[in-house]
Amino acid sequence: MKEKPLILALQETKLTNNKMKIAATNIAPSYALLATQGNCGGGTALLLHPTISVKESRRLSDGNLTWARIEFQGHSFHVAVVYGPHTSSHRAQLWKRLNQALPFQKWILIGDWNSIERPDQTSGHRNLMVGEEETNFRSLKLKFALSDAYDLAEERFGPTYTRFIAYSTEF
């Protein structure tokens, strides 16, 4: 039997909070659900395995971020799911908000940025970060010493440019 993942992150759920609760119950009934309904689509959710203790959680009202301070096996860290807006100016504002609002701690950020840092990260269908968006995102990366998991992974799954590194699992 395959192990269940400890953390599931969903972005662009486009579900009301009530529908997200129903979906979460079907996906992983025993997991804790932290979700934020998005404005005009979007939306983010974290589903956390019962062995993870949630110490604190917050959400942005626009649905672009859901985060939690969690403890697991004696370790404390933060995990967040982020959904990047579709326009460069709104993404620039989001990166700046995150840089100012997130506590300076250990972080795991999971998400769909709706943009890329380098041209080699796309088949030509994504928005390359430039200007204020690039500056704000790089500041966020520097503050939290973030690394792209895709660059660190020994095994990569999924089609080219998906940035998907997880193992599939059955619930």
Image: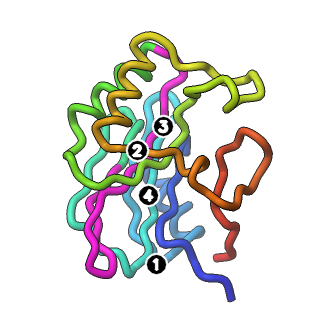
State which tag comes first along the sequence, 4 or 3: 4
Residue at 36% of width from left, 56% of height from top? 79
The local secondary structure at tag 3 comes to strand
Mark 3 Cα-neighbour bin, 10 Å: few <14, some 14–19, many ≥20: many
Mark 2 Cα-neighbour bin, 10 Å: few <14, some 14–19, many ≥20: some
The local secondary structure at tag 1 comes to loop
Mark 4 Cα-neighbour bin, 10 Å: few <14, some 14–19, many ≥20: many
Which tag is nearer the camera, tag 4 or tag 2?
2
Is the magenta region chiefly helix, strand or loop? strand
Quadrant location, the C terminus: bottom right
Which tag is nearer the camera, tag 1 or tag 3?
3
Residue 162 in the image: above or below residue 88? below
Q: Amino acid at mark 2?
A: Leu
Report the side of 118 relative to 35 (left or right). right
The local secondary structure at tag 2 comes to loop
State which tag comes first along the sequence, 1 or 2: 1
Tell me the residue that label 1 is attached to.
30
Which tag is nearer the camera, tag 1 or tag 2?
2
Q: How far apart are the alpha carbons under marks 4 and 1?
A: 13 Å
State which tag comes first along the sequence, 3 or 2: 3
**Mark 1 and mark 3 residues within 8 Å of each other at the beta carbon:** no
Tell me the residue that label 2 is attached to.
146
Residue 5 at x, y percent in the picture? 54, 72
Asked if one can make out residue 14 in the rendered structure from this viewpoint, the answer is no
Q: Amino acid at mark 3?
A: Tyr
Q: Which region is colored magenta? A: 67-88
Q: Amino acid at mark 4?
A: Leu
Tell me the residue that label 3 is attached to.
83
**Mark 3 and mark 2 residues within 8 Å of each other at the beta carbon:** no
Q: Amino acid at mark 1?
A: Ser
Tell me the residue that label 4 is attached to.
46
